Image: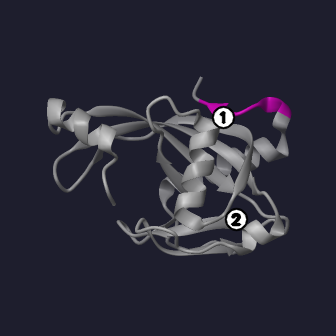
Amino acid sequence: MPIPEFVAALRSHVGTDLLWMPGVSGVVIDDDGRLLLGQRADTGQWAIVSGILEPGEDPAVGLAREVLEETGVSVRVDALTGVTVTPVVEYPNGDRSQYLDLCFLCRPVSPTAAAAAHVADDESLAVAWFAPDDLPADLAASTSERLGHTLGYLADPTAGPFFAR
């Protein structure tokens, strides 16, 4: 997976020191209630789509871009469902990052858009739709957490998005 140019530029100044990064993730649900997941190329685990925002990019716009780039599915972003902080991630080259993640509920813009799901970049080994009660066993822990927050939001939207209090 290529490192975004702006991150490479930051790394040229800070080396492997901890970078605080803005991230987005999306729970994409189709008209049949299925969830869009990608099997990550780096871990082999299944996960919801996530990514890093470009400098100055609005979070919902950045997430829609990430979903399209990774899965070929055009989505509308409906709601913010969670605001969390990831544990520190240490990459094989020694770089360390930690992410502020904004998780959103998304829907494909049409049934045709949902049917377009495919591996669209090198970040995924596979892309598929899953019924909520038939998720893969090798689901990333962060995906389980974000799905829980989104399902909680769907059960009671008046409670608003999840965040640590």
Image x and y of residue 99, in percent: 42, 37
Location of residue 88 with respect to 66 vertically, above or below: above
Total number of numbered discs in the rendering: 2
- Tell me the quadrant of the picture where the C terminus can be found: top right
Q: What is the span of residues highlighted in magenta in the rendered image?
A: 158-163
Which quadrant holds residue 133?
A: bottom right
Closest to the observer, 30 or 74: 74
Residue at 85% in and 65% down: 31
Q: Is disc 2 placed on a helix, strand or loop?
A: strand
Location of residue 131 with respect to 29 vertically, above or below: below
Asked if the magenta segment contains residue 57, the reply would be no
Residue at 54% in and 43% down: 24
In the picture, the disc for residue 51 is none
Query: Distance from label 2 to label 1 (Cα)?
Result: 19 Å
Marks 2 and 1: which is nearer the front?
2
User: Which numbered disc, 2 or 1, marks the residue that appears first in the sequence?
Assistant: 2
Location of residue 17 with respect to 148 vertically, above or below: above
Image x and y of residue 49, in percent: 55, 57
Residue behind mark 1 = 162
Residue behind mark 2 = 35
